[in-house]
Image (spheres, helix red, strand yellow):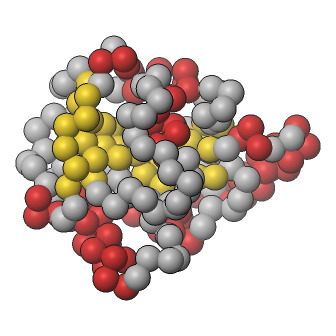
Amino acid sequence: MRFDSIDFKAAYGTSKQLPPSVEPEIVFSGRSNVGKSSLINKVFNRKNLARVSSVPGKTITVNFFSCDGVYFVDLPGYGYAKRNQSEKKRWAELMEGYFQSERNIALVIQLIDMRHAPSADDMTMLNFMKQMEIPFIIALTKSDKLNKTETEKRREELKQELADYEDITKIEFSSVTGKGVNEIKEIINSIEVN
């Protein structure tokens, strides 16, 4: 796949706007401020493909990008406490609408901040994907913010925290150092997208 040939296609704010799913879709999912935009930008070697913000919860639309006949889908981050109730309701409707509209999902890249235990929302998302038999991997973001001792400690804790997902591929990722970016690209390249 030519990762440098990606283009922004469209953003949708409600599930009714979502187009029918024709091309295979590779989805980026995670809580607000987990580093989703940074990971997307690193994978596609672009500075501003996905907008990085210092304000969590900035992505409030489902954003579609096209590359080599595959759609890459940036879902809005979940779990941002400062959203008002109507925003949270719209977000929930949008996410449900996305996953329940018979999408051609080839893979979900589920982002979890390596520094912390997965949140209740993270676990809900993991359980949902497992139940729905949606193929996914876990990208453990912000790994560069841990020193060697902290990294070892978190690896051990994650074995317990993600014990139900021990067969799922987990990749330690850093948008600063580029750690894990090649593994993510290899997995994307290995997906059968017929």
Q: Classify 148 as above or below 13.
A: above
Is residue 35 shown to the viewer in this render?
yes
At 68% from the left edge and 49% from the top edge, which residue is drawn? 114
Q: Is residue 182 left or right of residue 145?
A: left
Judging depth in this view, the residue of 101 and 75 nearest the camera is 75
- Name the residue at the right extreme: 149
Q: Classify 26 as above or below 166.
A: above
Q: Quadrant of residue 33?
A: bottom right
Q: Classify 5 as above or below 188.
A: above
Q: Quadrant of residue 93?
A: bottom left
Q: How many labels does the image show?
A: 0
Q: Is residue 125 left or right of residue 158?
A: left
Can you give x and y, in whole percent of width and height, for residue 155 in the image?
77, 46
Can you give x and y, in whole percent of width and height, for residue 57 in the image?
46, 63
Q: Quadrant of residue 3?
A: top left
At 63% from the left edge and 26% from the top edge, which residue is drawn? 178
Quadrant location of the C terminus? top left
Quadrant location of the N terminus? top left
Judging depth in this view, the residue of 38 and 71 nearest the camera is 38
Q: Is residue 139 left or right of residue 151?
A: left
Can you give x and y, in whole percent of width and height, for residue 50 in the image?
40, 40
